[in-house]
Every structure is written in C-alpha cells, then in structure tokens.
Amino acid sequence: MPRKQNERYVKEPPRFSSFKPAGIPRTELPGTSITLDEFEAVKLADYLELDQQDAADQMAISRSTFSRLVARARQKIAGALINGHELIIEGGRIHFINNLLVCRSCGHQFTVTMETDMNKCPACGAGKLMDYAGSFGHGRCCRGHHKGNRGNHATTGSDRTPG
C-alpha cells in the first residue's frame, strides 16, 4: 500500500485553471490534468529558475520529491502540447500560503495572506471579489496551516469546473 502523501505548500493559486489549443471547442478535446503542486514545482524550477533545494524548501518537501514532481509535470505538459490536449490544473494535497483576489468591479488584482479576511476591494471599495483559492476548493483549510496549525483540508479534484 502506498504511503500517504504529505500536504505541500503553494505560494498562491494559479491565475488560470486550464489551457487549450485555439479554435477547438473544449468539448471536443481530451484533457490532461496536472496537480497544483506539480504546477508550483514547474513554476519554481522553470519560470522562477530556483535551484531544486530552494524550491523544495519553499514547498516544504525533500529535494528528491521536488525532482519527481517537476519531472512528472513536465511529462504531462509536453504530452498535452504535443497531442493537442486541454491542460487542466487541479487537485493535490496542498495548502496555499497566499490568496489572489480580483475585484469584479474595477479589475484590481491583489494578493493577501490566507489569514487576511478581505471583503472589499482596497482600490474601489466594492464588495465584489473573486477568490482564486476558493475557486480551487481552498480557504479556511489553508488559514494558519503553514504556521504549524492543522486546518480542515479541502481536497481538490475534478469536481471543479475548468475556466
């Protein structure tokens, strides 16, 4: 029986949950999923160009686990690009450290810690905020968790509508 996977830390939710080839309706495309921790690993290694130990430390995992995550994510991403699949970012046992919020009234984007209760836009004062962590099934489960507290973890998965 496989060992239970430890929860990993992701700095903030991705701004997008899926990518697809242009001109083909989503309903006609097969999907390839990468988990939120695989997405974070590729972001840290390839986009931010961190060395593997620094990136592993940020995610609170071992360097060897980080290396496996990056390899698995790269394989899935390459397969989706080559085969013309929709790439869907979802799932995984993770906790967000920060949340990304966007005001639906003025479009202002801002990042807050998961402990911050924010219900109004700091730019325009409107109460119409889009909660990216919430759209991935996270919120209270991530509050205080990175400080050593145990939260009620929300396991994310394919029940989320890609958008």
Image: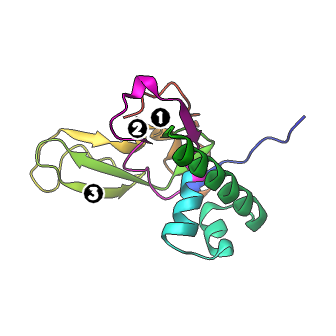
* Residue carrying label 2: 134
Residue positioned 78% across, 64% down in the render:
64
Disc 2 on helix, strand or loop?
helix
Relative side of 103 to 151, left or right: left
Residue denoted by label 3: 110
Crowdedness of circle 1 by 10 Å Cα count: few (<14), some, many (20+)? some
Q: Is residue 87 magenta?
A: no
Mark 2: give few (<14), some (14-19) or many (20+) Cα within 10 Å: some
**43 left or right, relative to 17:** right
Q: Provide the secondary structure element on which disc 1 rests.
A: loop
Q: Is residue 51 above or below residue 59?
A: below
Q: Number of callouts in the render?
A: 3
- Tell me: 8 left or right of 133: right
Q: Mark 1 highlights which residue?
A: 137
Where residue 144 sits in the image (x, y, percent)? Answer: 52, 51
For marks 2 and 3 on the same chain, the one whose residue lies earlier in the sequence = 3
* CB within 8 Å, label 2 to label 3: no
